[in-house]
């Protein structure tokens, strides 16, 4: 999965580089071939504003990337704790000779989902 994420990130970086080249050529063409129209916003200015927005997006992405990593780690910790708790409850039921009811379909589905997130348990 990490390799796919890295590959996707490289693709975005290449696309970003290509967009920068296109932006540079477009600015050059607009400045040399089209005089400023009265009452209209200059296309070069619009492109520069787009660049500012793009840089702000990159900053936000950089800020929220650690949050995403922490979120994944917390999800893993919660899953492990929940599975251990369920296992302890089942063991306590066996030790105290309580009647063990079969799991409902919903509980079976939830158990499968939990175990898919933490395959080593």
Image: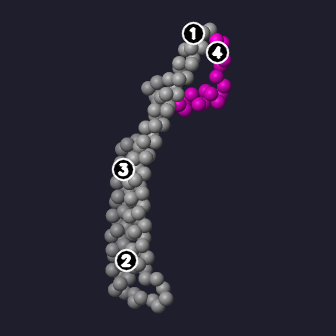
Question: Circle 3 sits on which residue?
Answer: 7
- Helix, strand or loop for disc 1: helix
Cβ atoms under marks 2 and 3 closer than 8 Å: no
Image depth: mark 4 or mark 1 in front: 1
From what the image shows, is residue 90 above or below residue 6?
A: above
* The residue stretch that appears in magenta: 98-116
> x, y (%) of residue 113?
55, 32
Question: Circle 4 sits on which residue?
Answer: 100
Question: Circle 1 sits on which residue?
Answer: 95
Q: Please tell me which residue is depicted at 40% across the width and 53% down the height of the picture.
A: 63
Image depth: mark 3 or mark 4 in front: 4
> x, y (%) of residue 24?
33, 74
**Mark 3 or mark 1: which comes first in sequence?**
3
Q: Mark 4, residues whose alpha carbon is within 10 Å: few (<14), some, or many (≥20)?
A: few
Question: Circle 2 sits on which residue?
Answer: 26
**Mark 3 or mark 4: which comes first in sequence?**
3
- Helix, strand or loop for disc 4: loop
- Quarter residue 42 falls in: bottom left
For the residues labelled 4 and 1, the Cα–Cα distance comes to 11 Å
> x, y (%) of residue 70?
42, 42
From what the image shows, is residue 76 above or below residue 8?
A: above
Cβ atoms under marks 3 and 1 closer than 8 Å: no
Image depth: mark 2 or mark 1 in front: 1
**Mark 2 or mark 3: which comes first in sequence?**
3
**Mark 2 or mark 1: which comes first in sequence?**
2
């Amino acid at each position: 999965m990490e390799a796919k994420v890295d590959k996707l990130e490289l693709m975005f970086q290449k696309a970003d580089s290509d967009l920068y080249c296109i932006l540079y050529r477009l600015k050059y063409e607009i400045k040399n071939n089209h005089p400023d129209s009265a009452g209209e916003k200059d296309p070069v200015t619009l492109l520069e504003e787009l660049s500012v927005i793009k840089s702000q997006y990159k900053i936000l992405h950089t800020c929220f990337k650690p949050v995403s990593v922490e979120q994944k780690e917390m999800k893993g910790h919660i899953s492990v704790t929940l599975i251990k708790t369920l296992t302890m409850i089942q063991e306590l039921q066996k030790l105290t000779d309580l009647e063990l009811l079969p799991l409902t379909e919903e509980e079976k589905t939830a158990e499968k989902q939990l175990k898919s997130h933490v395959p080593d348990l």
